[in-house]
Image (cartoon, grey):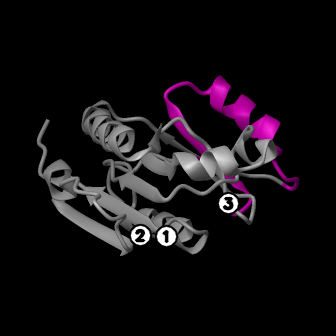
Amino acid sequence: MEGEVRATVRTDTFISDAELYRIGEDNPGWNVERIDGGVVMSPTNTRTDLINMRIGAALLDWGDRHDYLALGSSAGLKLGNNDVLSPDGALIAQERWDAAPEELREGYSRLVPDVIVELASPSDSRSRLRDKCERWHRDGARFVIMIDPKDQTVETWGTALPGLDIDWASFARMRI
C-alpha cells in the first residue's frame, strides 16, 4: 500500500510475552503485536489517535452506563493461537472480567472482549486489518467494528450488543 510504514520481524524462535513487552518498551510510538510467529510493528499516527480518543471516550461512556469495561489501544490481548493483538478499543462485560480466573487477566489477557473496534490508519493495509478483525471474531469477540476514515466506511462482524447505540459511521466521517 502506498505510504504504508510497517516492520515485521521473523525469528527462528518463539518471541515470549516478556520479549514482546520489552520490544514494545524499546520502541515507543510503535504499536507492537505478535502475529503468526512474527513481531509486527506499526507507527502510531497523530490524526488517527485524535479519532481513536473519541472512540475510546464513547466506549468508556457506554461501558460505564452498561457495566462494561473499556480497553484502549495499549491493551495487548492474547488469542488462542498465542497471537497478541492490540485493538484500538474494546468492551468487556464487567461480570465476565470478574468471573475470569486471575491468570486470564494477567499480562496479555486471554479474555477476548465482547466488542472490538479497529480504526484504520494511513499505514494500515485494509486486507490486513480485515484479517485482524476476522481473527478477533473467530476467537470469540461477539461484535467487531472496522472504521476507515479515509474511505469513510464501517465494516462489522457479528451482532452488536443490545443497546450499543454508538454511531460508528460518525467516526468514519471525521476529518481532523
Q: Are marks 1 and 2 in contact (CB under 8 Å)?
A: yes
Mark on residue 172? Answer: none
Q: Secondary structure at mark 1?
A: helix
Is disc 3 placed on a helix, strand or loop?
loop
Q: CA distance from mark 1 to mark 2?
A: 6 Å
Q: How far across and down, in percent of the image, does residue 152 sit?
A: 15, 59
Which numbered circle lies on residue 127? 2
Q: Looking at the image, is mark 1 or mark 2 nearer the viewer?
A: 1
Q: Quadrant of the N terminus?
A: bottom left
Q: Is residue 34 magenta?
A: yes
- Residue occupied by mark 3: 79
Q: Residues within 10 Å of mark 1 (few under 14, many from 20)?
A: few
User: Residue at horizontal 78%, vertical 42%?
Assistant: 102
Out of 5 and 21, give the one closest to the viewer.
21
Between 11 and 161, which is closer to the camera in this rendering? 161
Q: Is residue 75 above or below residue 113?
A: above
Tell me which amino acid carries mark 2.
Answer: Ser
* Residue at (65, 25) in percent of width and height: 25
Q: What secondary structure is marked by label 2? A: helix
Q: Would residue 174 be found to the left or right of residue 139 on screen?
A: left
The residue carrying mark 1 is 131
In the rendered image, residue 77 lying in the magenta stretch gets the answer no
Query: Residue 162: x, y in percent?
Result: 32, 65
Counting from the top left corner in percent of width and height, residue 30 is at 52, 34
Q: Amino acid at mark 1?
A: Asp
Q: CA distance from mark 2 to mark 3?
A: 19 Å
Residue at point 42% right, 68% down?
130
Q: Position of residue 65 (x, y in %)?
A: 33, 41
Q: Amino acid at mark 3?
A: Leu
Q: Is any part of residue 88 visible from this angle?
A: no
Instruction: Point out the stretch of residues depicted in magenta.
Output: 12-40
Cβ–Cβ under 8 Å for marks 1 and 3: no
